Image: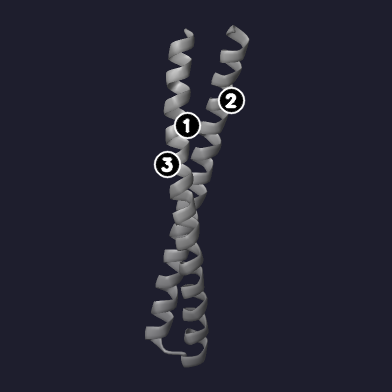
Amino acid sequence: MARPVVERRLTALGSRLARLRDDLAVAEEQLAHFAADAGDARVRSLVSETAISEREHRGAERHATTMALHRDQLIAEIERLEAAQDDLLDRLTRDG
């Protein structure tokens, strides 16, 4: 692969990684919020023992679980792109 092509791909990967890392920071912040809400809803559900509070607890747990899945997907994508970036860097240094 020609050096300019590798450099363009590295630039594109770097930009994509920066965006994903920003998204990951937001997702982790939101996950912390949703997890705290789920914990609060769980306590309210245990204390009040009503159907409404149990439903709120389940909803809060779903939100936290969904956000955790999203965060995990972002981490996996970042790891995949970092591996691709490493491969391109290897090509760049190997091909001189």
Which numbered disc covers residue 19?
3
Callout 2: helix, strand or loop? helix
Instruction: Pick out the residue farthest to the left.
Output: 52
Q: CA distance from mark 3 to mark 1?
A: 9 Å
Q: CA distance from mark 2 to mark 3?
A: 18 Å
| Residue 48 percent coordinates (x, y) | 46, 92
In the picture of the structure, the residue carrying the numbered disc 2 is 86
For marks 2 and 3, the one nearer the N-term is: 3
Q: CA distance from mark 1 to mark 2?
A: 11 Å
In the picture of the structure, the residue carrying the numbered disc 1 is 14
Q: Are marks 3 and 1 in contact (CB under 8 Å)?
A: no
The image's colour scheme reads one colour
Q: The residue under label 1 is which amino acid type?
A: Gly
Quarter-of-image position of residue 82: top right
| Residue 63 percent coordinates (x, y) | 42, 65
Callout 3: helix, strand or loop? helix
Q: Is residue 52 left or right of residue 82?
A: left
Front tag of 1 and 2: 1
Q: Is residue 93 left or right of residue 3?
A: right
Which numbered disc covers residue 6?
none
